[in-house]
Amino acid sequence: MKITDARVIVCSPGRNFVTLKITTEDGIYGLGDATLNGRELAVVSYLRDHVVPLLIGRDARRIEDLWQYLYKGAYWRRGPVTMTAIGAVDVALWDILGKAANMPVYRLLGGASREGVLVYGHANGTTIDETTDAVADYIRLGYRAVRAQSGVPGLTTTYGVGRGTMYYEPAQKGMPEEATWSTERYLTAVPPLFARLRETFGPDLHLLHDAHHRLTPIEAARLGKDLEPHRLFWLEDVVPAELQESFRLIRQHTTTPLAVGEVFGSIHDCELLIREHLIDYIRATVVHAGGLTHLRKIANLAEIHHVRTGCHGATDLSPVCMAAALHFDLSVHNFGIQEYMRHTDETDRVFPHHYRFEDGLMHPGEAPGLGVDIDEILAAKYPYERAYLPTNRKEDGTVHSW
Ligand code: EZ4
Ligand code: CO
C-alpha cells in the first residue's frame, strides 16, 4: 500500500489548524493533526519541505518503521516542531490502516478497555461567583469533571479566564498580548475558590485546576497543601517542568494529585517523573508527543508506575487530534481523564466527525479509521491568520512563564 501523495492543509475556521493528508495508491487517505499553537508555519515547512518527499513511495502499513525512520533519520532529535510533524504522519497512517481494515482505530490499539472516556470541561469567570455559576452550567450539560479558573483580584487578565464561558481561546490574532502576573495575588486567590466550589457542589464532582507553569517548587508545594482539604482531582503544571527533579520537593509536601506534560514531546521529558512516581497524571498528547505510536510507549511506562493518562485537549488541538486521543483513551488500560474544550461550530463544520459527548463521557464512534474528515472546500474559505499565545510579565516588568 504505497503512499502516492501527502499534502499539508492550513486553515483558520476560528483559529489556525494544520492538517496532513496522506493518500495511498488504492485511494485511501488518512489525516493527522500538525497544529503547534503560535508556531504553525514552522511545522508546515518541516512537513512540506523535509518530510513529504521522504514519504512518497513508502508502504503506509509500516507505521513503527516510518516513525523510527523520521525520528532517527533526521539526526536532530526531539523538539516540538519535529515531534508534531512526526505525530501528524503517524496519526494519518493509523487512520489509513483503520480504513483499510474497516475498523475504528481503537480496535487496532487493542479494543475498548472501558465503555466511555471521562472528560473535563473548562469553567471560568472573573470572580468566584461567576466561576461557580460557570461550573453549574457544565454540570447541567452532564459533565462529571470540571476545571475551574478564576480571575485574580488586582490582575487585569488571568490565564484560563476567557472571552465567553463555554470557550477558552488563549491565542489571539495579531501580535502577542502581554499579561501581568503576581504569584502572591494568585496564591491568595485560589484556595477560597475551591473552598466555595466544594461547599456548593459537594464531594462527588471532580474538580481540576491549572497553574500553567508559573510557580517555583516551594510555592507549588504550598498551593498543593492549601488545596488538600478541597480534594482536587488534579493540580496541573505547577512549575515549568524542564527540571524533572524539582517534583521531588513538591511531592514530599503535598498529597494533592499532580498532572503535568501538555508541552512534553517525548518519553524523555517525563521518564524520571514517571519512574519516581512524582506525578499522578501524564498530560502528553497525540499531536505534540509523536503520535499514537509514541504516546502508547509513554502510557505503557506510566502504567507500571501507577501513573494514569490525562491528555491535553484544548481548542488548539484539532478535531483530528481529538478523535485520535479518544481512540487512545478508550483503549489504553491506565487512562485517567481527557480534557475536552469544545470547538466552535465553524471548526466542527470544517472537520466533520463521529466522536460524541453524552452524560459526561465521550466515545470516538465506530467509523473505520479515526472517524474524522476535512471539508477542504470549506477549509479553503478560512485562510491562515497570524496569531500568538500571550506573553507574561511580573508587575515589575520581569518576563515570566505564561
Ligand atoms: O494553554 O492549549 O490545559 N490546557 C491548557 C491550554 C494551553 C493551550 C496552549 O496552546 O493549558 O489552555
Ligand atoms: Co494546561
Image (cartoon, grey):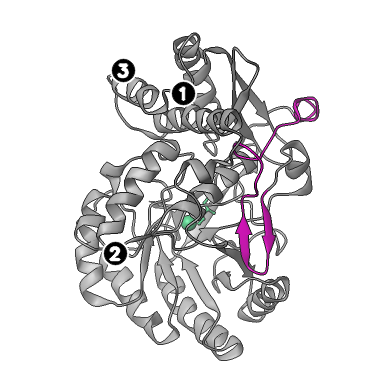
Check disc 3 and report its element: helix, strand or loop: helix
Residue 267 percent across, percent down from the top left: 30, 43
Check disc 2 and report its element: helix, strand or loop: loop
Gap between marks 1 and 2 measured at Cα:
32 Å
> Which residue does the numbered mark 3 point to in the structure image?
73
Location of residue 386 (image quadrant): top right
In this rendering, position of residue 136 left or right of residue 226: right
Q: Amino acid at mark 3?
A: Gly
In this rendering, position of residue 302 left or right of residue 188: left
Location of residue 74 (image quadrant): top left
Q: Which residues are magenta?
A: 355-382
Gap between marks 3 and 1 measured at Cα:
19 Å
Q: Earlier in the sequence, mark 1 or mark 2?
A: 1
Graded by Cα atoms within 10 Å as few (under 14), some (14 to 19) or many (20 or more), the crowding at tag 3 reads few
Q: Are marks 1 and 2 in contact (CB under 8 Å)?
A: no
> Which residue does the numbered mark 2 point to in the structure image?
306
